[in-house]
Image: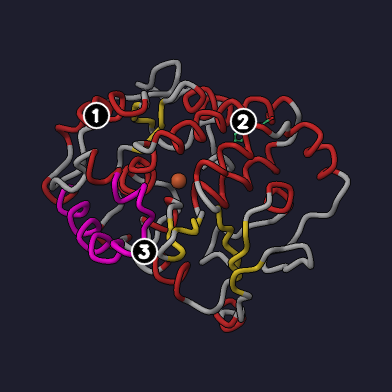
Amino acid sequence: MAEETHVLDRPPEGAAADWTIDQHWDRYTAEEHATWDTLFARQAQLLPGRASNAWLKGLDVLKLDRPGIPDFRALSDRLMALTGWQVVAVPGLVPDDVFFDHMANRRFVAGNFIRTPEQLDYLQEPDVFHDVFGHVPMLADPVFADYLAAYGRGGQRALGLGALKYLSRLYWYTVEFGLIAEPEGLRIYGAGIVSSFSESRFALEDPSPDRIMLDLARVMRTEYRIDDFQQNYFVVPSFDELLRLTVETDFAPLYDALKQQPDLPVATVLDTDTVLNRGTQDYARAKG
Ligand code: PHE
Ligand code: FE
């Protein structure tokens, strides 16, 4: 995730200058591999019919259904052949400029640690299950792979323009929590959803959240929550359209305009929105 706190200002002991570390695949214990398998089995039975075709296909072509935590070397070989991406290990969160430099160069940074059995449903920092199971299948899709690399370059530019707050929201509402309208219905592709047992159903089936067609400026004005299920999801018509829209739009004037406008609190619905489902917000209200 691009927007985080608690980041060191230089690589920790043992990390390279670009913050990468060895995954140390051989050091995973049997219990850690079993945690992956447990998480995998729970999601695997939920995702057919819920995850986007691109994500399901990525899981298959990358052979991520094999037991145990994937070895990044074998995974990167497959990914490289498909879309030119690699998966590299980092010790945790990295600074924004480092994150964007890797991304612009088609290196996806992934945590190498896995959550403990007590943390199956919730953890604060992205672990190898979130990063690899959640994100990496989408990198096997040529269009989404191009989108994420372009996003990395956009991130470098946004840093220089003091506009990271706005661009990070686009990441949040696409890469992490995005929905896509497929011919058979809405599907999830955001890594934060596909890697979550409860949100993979909530995002599609619960009447609480708003589901709104994605508009660039609108999304970049919209705040998000990091502590619970989203109260609004944004829907893309296709990844081709997402790529076209983001690559063809010069974000600099958009950022200037956004700086003159108030941010939108979550669960705001505008007259100009194309709303697919107006949410009841019952879930968020019940939580107070
Ligand atoms: N076109 C954007 C810009 O001008 C860069 C970008 C591309 C951002 C793709 C996000 C995704 O800054
Ligand atoms: Fe993520």
Mark 2 Cα within 10 Å, few/some/many (few <14, many 20+)?
A: many
Q: Is 279 placed left or right of 254 in the picture?
A: left
Kindly state the secondary structure of the residue where label 1 is placed.
helix
Q: Which mark is residue 78?
A: 1
Q: Position of residue 259 (x, y in %)?
A: 84, 43
Highlighted magenta segment, given as a residue range: 33-57
Residue located 61% across and 81% down the image: 280
Kindly state the secondary structure of the residue where label 3 is placed.
loop
Circle 1/circle 2 CB separation < 8 Å: no
Q: Is residue 59 above or below residue 179?
A: above
Foreground residue, 220 or 119? 220
Tell me: is circle 2 under 8 Å from ligand 1.
Answer: yes
Residue 195 falls in image quadrant: bottom left
Tell me: is circle 3 under 8 Å from ligand 2.
Answer: no
**Tag 1: amino acid:** Arg
Name the residue tied to disc 2: 155
**Going by the picture, which residue comes out furthest to the front?**
183
**Tag 3: amino acid:** Arg
Q: Main secondary structure of the magenta part?
A: helix
**Going by the picture, which residue comes out furthest to the top?**
17
Foreground residue, 240 or 52? 240
Q: Is residue 216 above or below residue 158?
A: below
Q: Which mark is residue 50?
A: 3
